[in-house]
Image: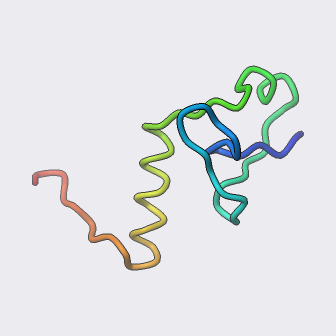
Amino acid sequence: MEVDHIIPLQGKLVSGLHVSWNPQYLTKPDNGKKNARCNLTGASKLYGQILQVVGLKEKISPNT
């Protein structure tokens, strides 16, 4: 396993931070395939969940 940053530290479109919720473990082949790219939709959902946990974002009901 290798440590990968969900939001790459030096991505082409966005740059992430070296904070507790940004790293993830990937196998060496999967980390090589990712190659400093980011799934922005997935990352946005993750950040939204983190902001809810710390109280910086209100939960939005699915019917809104």
Q: Where is residue 54 in the image (x, y as percent from the top left)?
A: 46, 77
Residue 30: x percent and y percent? 77, 26
The quarter of the picture where residue 14 lies is top right
Q: Which residue lies furthest to the bottom in this view?
A: 55
Going 72% across and 52% down the picture, which residue do you hit? 23
Count the numbered circles shown.
0
**Colouring used for the render:** rainbow
Q: In which quarter of the image is residue 61?
A: bottom left
Residue farthest toward the left in the current orientation of the protein? 64
* 54 relative position to 57: left or right: right
Residue 21 left/right relative to 26: left
Q: Which quarter of the rendering shows the C terminus?
A: bottom left
Look at 44% across and 61% down and name the residue there.
49
Q: Is residue 58 above or below residue 3?
A: below
Q: In this view, does 16 lie to the left or right of 4?
A: left
Name the quadrant containing residue 59: bottom left
Q: Is residue 11 left or right of residue 51?
A: right
Which residue is depicted at the point 84% across and 32% down?
Answer: 27
Question: Which residue is nearer to you in this view: 8 or 41?
Answer: 8
* 22, 26: nearer the viewer: 22
Rendered location of residue 1, percent (x, y): 89, 39
Residue at (72%, 59%) from the top-left corner? 18
Q: Residue 34's x, y, as percent?
A: 70, 26
